[in-house]
Amino acid sequence: MSTAANAERAGRPLVPRAHSLCAVLRKVLGRLLGRLSRKRLLVPFRERAAPAKIAVKSVGHTYRGRGQVVALENVNLDIHHGQMVCLLGPSGCGKSTLLYALAGTVEPSGGHVTIDGKEVKGPGPDRLLMFQDHALFPWLTVRQNIVFALRARGLDRRECERRAHEYIHLVQLDGFERSLPHQLSGGMRQRASLARALSMDPAVLLMDEPFGALDAQTRGQMHNLLQRIWMRQRKTVVFVTHDIREALVLGDRVVVMAGRPGRILWDLEVRLERPRDPDDERLVTLSRQIRTALREAQAQSRPMAGAGGEGRENAEELDGAGSGSSLDGGAAAGGVPHPAGAHLGAGG
Amino acid sequence: MLRGFLHLADDGRLLKAVARSLGRLLQGYGISVLIGVPLGIATARLRPLRLTVKPIVMGLQSLPSICWLPLAILWFGLSESAILFVVVMGSLLSIAISTEDGVSSIQPQLLQVAGTLGIRGPRFYGGVLVPAALPGIVTGLKLGWSFAWRALMAGELLFVSGGLGQLLVTARELLDVAQVMAVMVAIVAIGVVMDRILFQAVEVRVRRRWGLEAP
């Protein structure tokens, strides 16, 4: 560095050799660092001393219907302020139930969920739930959707308009303010829905496979957008997905869950710099690691599961998902009734 | 027939009768809407009402509205109220049923998102529930209108007290076929204008805006 500076000061052009030397050094160093850190890209999440933003303490939930379905059993999870946590698991593993317990739309049959130390009882203005379906009001334009939601919070009209404008710009929907939801593409609708959610400025954003119904390309764009916004605003986000790659792209932490009964298998911290690229070699490797580990875990639990048929069915499902990175395989694995109704059941 | 029509129109009887009938219709229909829409929403939203009121409403729906006339005459006497009662009973039920249908077929996600966005109380009912159910409600209003129109005509025919129905009866008593047909044409014309032009236009506009129909 200093030689280059001296050379410049002396009025001579930079020696090309110095350039290439620097580049080689950087490459070697980078590769060394990469190799060193590769093993540490995914580490078990270590509990922090700081009080948790969201605390889930020994939460269990059983759906009563024809035969009891244990959706969650003794789940403990601390989520800290500003974290983006992905709940990852096959359908029927209780990840959505856990999310709805955080949202307050499902009251767990056991345990406690607290946010900032206060027990969750019903939906509240500090948490906002986003669905796979955009759930925009179909009779209102994009701008009106945002303004209407903000007006319900008691903001004055000018402030609402200002925020609507700001967030429409943030999700790159400029020029579509006056469009009705049915006039937009799937990705644009989901962006409008995201804008509406963010404009409410919730402390916690809860997302239930919000990009599950989008095509792969659009989903990639949404991941980029969400990462950029998150890097700027650092909201606490809990994101439910069955897509390993998606979880790794988005999450600071990936909480891997398994079903029957719904429980947490691993709580992993992802140490990749942002914004992350889904085709990043390291990310692809990590995704393969998780899939392999899941298959092993599945194989181990099979003999213990007793009802062998069920276990095999699940393992096949995971194997079948080898080409993509989906845990779902499209088939509905569990008999767990979905808390939000049939709409959410359809996997990507 | 044309002569009969011109004759009726000329001496102002037709106009007077139309005005009288439409006045009654508007009154009866207005009452039906004011009761029917809230009743439909309440039956859709409240479980006890759904279990008790809905079967009654569905059952009464199969009763032709003119069958209410004897009861109406016993209760209200030979008065304006009796015929209004028949009109109301004719349209109220179909409005309530369509509204109930519209409300219960709202996407559950829309209601859930309203909850998580913190939209409650009057803002919820006026800003979310009614607009979301509006396609169903408009269909109910259209149905209710045509039922009200039929009920009114039947009532006016049987229970004579002015209006187009009475004009029809008078014409029959005078054996004036031209006049009978002229009044019938007038009745059809009013029905078509209201139904096709007014309600159809509103319905199509609502369905387009809601994205239920390609523009």
Image (cartoon, coloured by chain):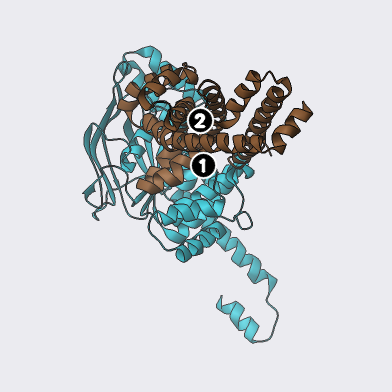
Chain colours: A cyan, B brown
Of the pair B112 and A154, the residue shown nearer to us: A154
Residue that lies at the very extreme toward the bottom in this rendered image: A10
Q: Which residue corresponds to mark 2?
A: A347
User: Can residue B213 be seen from the camera position used here?
Assistant: no
Q: Position of residue A259 (x, y in %)?
A: 36, 26
User: Can residue A170 be seen from the camera position used here?
Assistant: yes
Residue for point 51% across, 26% down: A329
Q: Single out the mark in the foreground, 2 or 1.
A: 1
Lower position in the chain sequence, tag 2 or tag 1:
1
Q: Which residue corresponds to mark 1?
A: A134
Q: Quadrant of the N terminus of chain A?
A: bottom right
Q: Quadrant of the C terminus of chain A?
A: top right
Determine whether the residue tagged by mark 1 lies in a helix, strand or loop: loop
Q: Are marks 2 and 1 on the same chain?
A: yes
Q: Position of residue A142 (x, y in %)?
A: 56, 51
Do residues under tags 2 and 1 come within 8 Å of each other at their CB atoms? Answer: no
Mark 1 residue type: His
Q: Position of residue B95 (x, y in %)?
A: 48, 30
The reply, left or right, for residue A99 in relation to residue B12 is left
Of the pair A260 and A282, the residue shown nearer to us: A260
